[in-house]
């Protein structure tokens, strides 16, 4: 239980920020922290007592919504005097429910289109506040500058928000609105701040990053933006968070071949390896399109990591469809899988679909796909044993004393070395695999 200690007179406001969900949420929370610090507040851990507690929620699944409610209740119990500020996707979709979640406790609720107003609203003490603009009407992305990511050696560079796809299983277009892009001048300014702060890797992220620039009149798109970032920041590793199968084209492959600091690591959401299920999902591409994208990347850069998301047990997925998906992934040079069981998300089209797949069947399919993931990772890692890789070390493990970091092609590596090497890029020889972990030693060169 958190111990409530008296606050010294005239001391700065103590602010805590708790974050659930995606990289965009993490970027936005980092922006809140930056702004609170600029206002003279003291940032404290989410386990500490705070005067203001910001909870950045998630609602991508029904389970995420439940976790958001649980976290809000827990923080309300442990911080009975704190002003609670609730934002994020759950706040956007459940504003009425939030009003009754914690009886007799005024809440400040900030919708996703109004996050740029959060800090000022939080610092204005008073009764309950609701700032939740109709997200469907939002036409501009919120400006949320960030100075630093606490405890991180890689910085998220948010370039875009929202999604126009309306996939049958996904609530995101209803919580994040339509695709909105950050003007390129603002993107570059944020990247320069990260460069000044000494970050050696930027992860270009958003809700649907491949649609960057299409809503602006600047003539920019994701490919021109990546090229500009690579040109302007030659000393920083540029990593793309994800890209749709239909967006893997010659322009993206040219970036991979032209810029050594554009990381050879592409994450391509698949969701199903069966074309009929993809059509039911409203994914607008076929399994063959995905296969061609993977093969084109592998042909150009066989050392590149290629990952994907896969949903098991989508409504209507019979044994034939499940087997089609499994064989597709087994036969392709995929490096890893992120496997999720399909779960009903109220408010989405798929929640109303007939022929929902029984839980035991979903669990079997998830287990088979996760076993494939382990085999794919192991094979990819093993193929690089004996090679020299450039590793950005992120931290030193307190238990093992080993440095931990990632290669350019996203292989997690552990290595002996001084803590001084954290936040540096070091040439490392990959020497062995031990219980799924890649071990390395610093190269003499």
Image: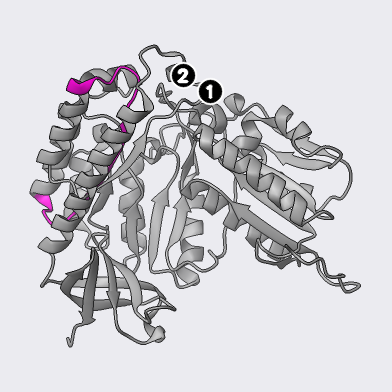
In the image, residue 21 above or below residue 247: below
Q: How is the image coloured?
A: one colour
Tag 2 or tag 1, which sits nearer the N-term?
1
* Residue shown at the point (66%, 49%) measured from the top left: 55
* Residue shown at the point (47%, 50%) measured from the top left: 23
The reply to whether residue 116 is in sight is: no
Q: How many marks?
A: 2
Q: Nearer the viewer, residue 286 or 202?
A: 286
Which image quadrant is residue 318 in?
Answer: top left
Residue denoted by label 2: 351
Mark 1 falls on what kind of element? Answer: loop
Q: Is residue 120 left or right of residue 196?
A: right
Residue denoted by label 1: 346
Q: Which segment did they paint magenta?
A: 300-320
Q: Check residue 303 for magenta coloring.
A: yes
Are the residues at dot 1 and dot 2 in contact (C-beta closer than 8 Å)? Answer: yes
Q: Check residue 173 for magenta coloring.
A: no
Residue 183: x, y in percent?
49, 44
The reply to whether residue 74 is in sight is: yes
Residue 103: x, y in percent?
82, 37
Quadrant assignment for the N terminus = bottom right
Which image quadrant is residue 123 in?
Answer: bottom right
Residue 219: x, y in percent?
38, 37
Crowd around label 1: few <14 · some 14–19 · many ≥20 (10 Å): some
* Residue shown at the point (49%, 31%) measured from the top left: 172
């Amino acid at each position: 239980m958190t111990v409530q200690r008296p606050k010294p007179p005239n001391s700065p406001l103590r602010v805590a920020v708790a974050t659930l969900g995606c990289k965009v949420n993490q970027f936005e929370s980092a922006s809140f922290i930056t702004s609170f610090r600029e206002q003279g507040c003291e940032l404290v851990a989410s386990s500490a007592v705070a005067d203001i507690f910001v909870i950045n929620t998630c609602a991508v699944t029904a389970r995420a919504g439940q976790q958001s409610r649980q976290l809000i209740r827990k923080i309300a119990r442990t911080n009975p005097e704190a002003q609670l500020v609730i934002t994020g996707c759950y706040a956007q979709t459940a504003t009425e429910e939030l009003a009754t979640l914690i009886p007799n406790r005024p809440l400040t609720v900030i919708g996703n289109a109004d996050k740029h107003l959060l800090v000022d609203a939080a610092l204005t003490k008073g009764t309950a506040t609701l700032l939740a603009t109709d997200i469907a009407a939002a036409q501009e992305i919120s400006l949320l500058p960030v100075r630093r990511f606490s405890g991180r050696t890689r910085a998220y560079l948010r370039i875009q928000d929202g999604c126009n796809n309306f996939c049958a299983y996904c609530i995101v277009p209803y919580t994040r609105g339509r695709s909105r892009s950050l003007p390129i001048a603002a993107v570059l300014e944020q990247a320069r701040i990260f460069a000044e702060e000494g970050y050696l890797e930027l992860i270009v992220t958003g809700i649907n990053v491949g649609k960057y620039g299409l809503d602006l009149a600047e003539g920019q798109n994701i490919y021109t933006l990546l090229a500009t970032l690579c040109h302007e920041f030659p000393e920083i590793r540029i990593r793309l968070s994800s890209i749709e199968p239909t967006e893997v084209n010659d322009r993206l492959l040219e970036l991979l071949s032209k810029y050594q600091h554009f990381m050879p690591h592409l994450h391509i959401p698949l969701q199903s390896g069966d074309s009929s299920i993809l059509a039911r999902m409203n994914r607008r591409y076929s399994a063959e399109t995905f296969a061609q994208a993977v093969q084109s990347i592998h042909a150009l850069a066989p050392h590149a990591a290629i990952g994907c998301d896969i949903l098991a047990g989508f409504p209507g997925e019979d044994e034939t469809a499940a087997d089609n998906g499994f064989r597709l992934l087994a036969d392709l040079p995929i490096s890893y899988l992120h496997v999720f069981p399909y779960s009903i998300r109220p408010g989405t089209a798929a929640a109303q679909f007939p022929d929902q797949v029984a839980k035991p069947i979903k669990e079997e399919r998830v287990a088979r796909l996760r076993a494939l993931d382990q085999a794919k990772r192991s094979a990819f890692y093993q193929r690089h044993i004996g090679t020299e890789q450039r590793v950005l070390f992120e931290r030193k493990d307190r238990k093992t004393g080993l440095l931990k970091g990632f290669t350019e092609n996203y292989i997690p590596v552990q290595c002996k070395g001084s803590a001084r090497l954290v936040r540096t890029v070091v040439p490392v020889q990959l020497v062995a695999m031990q219980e799924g972990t890649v071990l390395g030693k610093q190269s003499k060169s």
